[in-house]
Image (cartoon, rainbow, N blue to C red):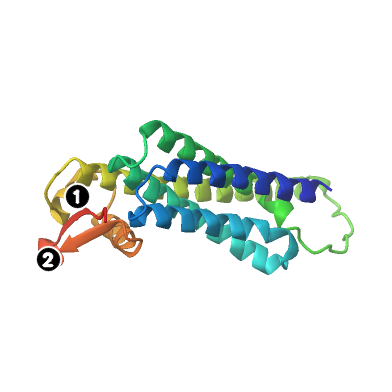
Amino acid sequence: MLVLKNFKDLTDKCRKITEALYRVTDLMPEQEPLKWSLRERAMGIFSKITELKDIPIYKKARNLEEIIHSTSGILNFLELASAASFISQLNFEVLKREYLALVNFIEDRKEEFLPTEPVLIQPLPSNINSLTQANDKGHNRQNNKISAKEMSVKDDIDRKSKIIAILNNNKDWVSIKDIIFAFKDVGPKTVQRELSAMISEGLLKTIGEKRWRKYALKTN
């Protein structure tokens, strides 16, 4: 019953966020591609969540990872819509908070969404302390894994948000050298990967080659 309740709660949360996103994007021009990209991604996330309850476990795991990845992508598009003044800063912050809460809800209940197969109980070891210590270590590893995943999503969003802010503050093209220079604590290859991902997602446009390459926000 708890698992079914979690699925229902997750679906309800996502439905409310999707409805809110539709209301916010109603104010955007019909001919603006960003409006339809946001709605398409929001519906993609909602569709994957609604089918979670009725699909095999191996597909559930894949769906959950895709939902988390898609949430990162939709936040980048919302950041761009806010930077281009298509949506207000307040609406952006509300949607961002709710989508991140959705990711946290999934991460906190992943073991309940993905139950493992029952196993035969083995006899307890002669030294019960060794079992307790092993379980503690396994629990700590699991907590560290979840924390690392959450931090990875947050870092990815933060880097892309910073790139958007840099480009939004410049009316002209910005060189790759200047963008990399703005990231003191991140390696050049990491920044280049983020830029490539943002181009693939339709967030940026680019001119030039290699070290002469320049970037700008793609708003239409």
Q: Which mark is drawn over residue 204?
A: none
Q: Are marks 1 and 2 in contact (CB under 8 Å)?
A: no
The secondary structure type at the circle numbered 1 is helix
Disc 2 target residue: 208
Disc 1 target residue: 179
Q: Position of residue 35 (x, y in %)?
A: 39, 52
Front residue (pair 157, 54): 54
- Is 122 rendered above or below residue 28? below
Q: Which quarter of the rendered picture does the C terminus lie within?
A: bottom left
Residue at the outermost front position: 30
Label 1 crowding class (10 Å Cα cut-off): few <14, some 14-19, many 20+? some
Residue at the outermost top position: 90
Q: Position of residue 131 (x, y in %)?
A: 78, 50
The secondary structure type at the circle numbered 2 is loop
Label 2 amino acid? Answer: Gly
Label 1 amino acid? Answer: Ile
Front residue (pair 35, 126): 35
Sequence order check, earlier mark of 1 and 2: 1
Query: Disc 1 versus disc 2: distance between alpha carbons?
Result: 15 Å
Query: Is residue 85 left or right of 214 when viewed as pictured?
Result: right
Query: Is residue 136 left or right of 62 when viewed as pictured?
Result: right
